[in-house]
Image (cartoon, rainbow, N blue to C red):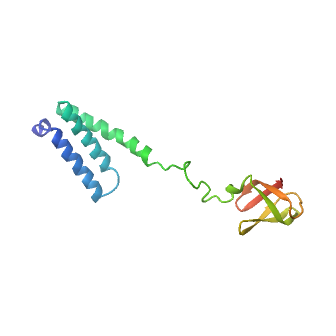
Amino acid sequence: MTDMFVSLGAWNWLIFGFILMALETIAPGVFLFWLGLAALLVGLISFAVHLSWQIQLVMFAVFAAAAVPAWRRLARPKLDESDSPFLNKRTEALLGREFTLEKPIIDGSGTVRIGDTVWRVAGPDTPAGTRVKVVQVDGANLTVAAA
């Protein structure tokens, strides 16, 4: 068994790395890829510097352990950099915008047309045709104030 470890050379690490990456294509889970990458790094370093088998195994363990946080950082979804930040938050996109009342606000309730949709709004009594600004959203309820 120790003969196998003593004979670990750069080619063995490279072959091991490619085998792990090939296994990743058969059983995808993005785990074997990083182990394969760690083996490839050890193989490339072993070409440049002659290292003992113990150091090669420690380097493989360190590279494999360092790959886990690197993978988590790369795989984390970028929520803040979305090109459509209000995709599932339609009412939040209306916050701060101004619209013209379609029906007057009487007893705290009126309507405003936004695009092809009529929205129910709440606010102080205001005549139809007045510009109002959306100051608060709560689900499908818009609260407005005079613009």
Q: Residue at x 16, y 42 (%)?
A: 11
Q: Is residue 94 above or below residue 119?
A: above
Q: Residue at x 32, y 46 (%)?
A: 34
Q: Is residue 13 left or right of residue 137?
A: left
Q: Is residue 74 left or right of residue 44?
A: right
* Percent x, y of residue 82: 55, 52
Q: Is residue 7 above or below residue 19?
A: above
Front residue of 125 and 94: 94
Q: Is residue 6 left or right of residue 44?
A: left
* Percent x, y of residue 75: 43, 49
The mark tally for this picture is: 0
Q: Quadrant of residue 1?
A: top left
* Percent x, y of residue 27: 30, 58
Q: Quadrant of residue 107?
A: bottom right
Q: Residue at x 27, y 59 (%)?
A: 26
Front residue of 69 and 120: 120
Q: Residue at x 62, y 56 (%)?
A: 86
* Percent x, y of residue 9: 15, 38
Q: Quadrant of residue 3?
A: top left
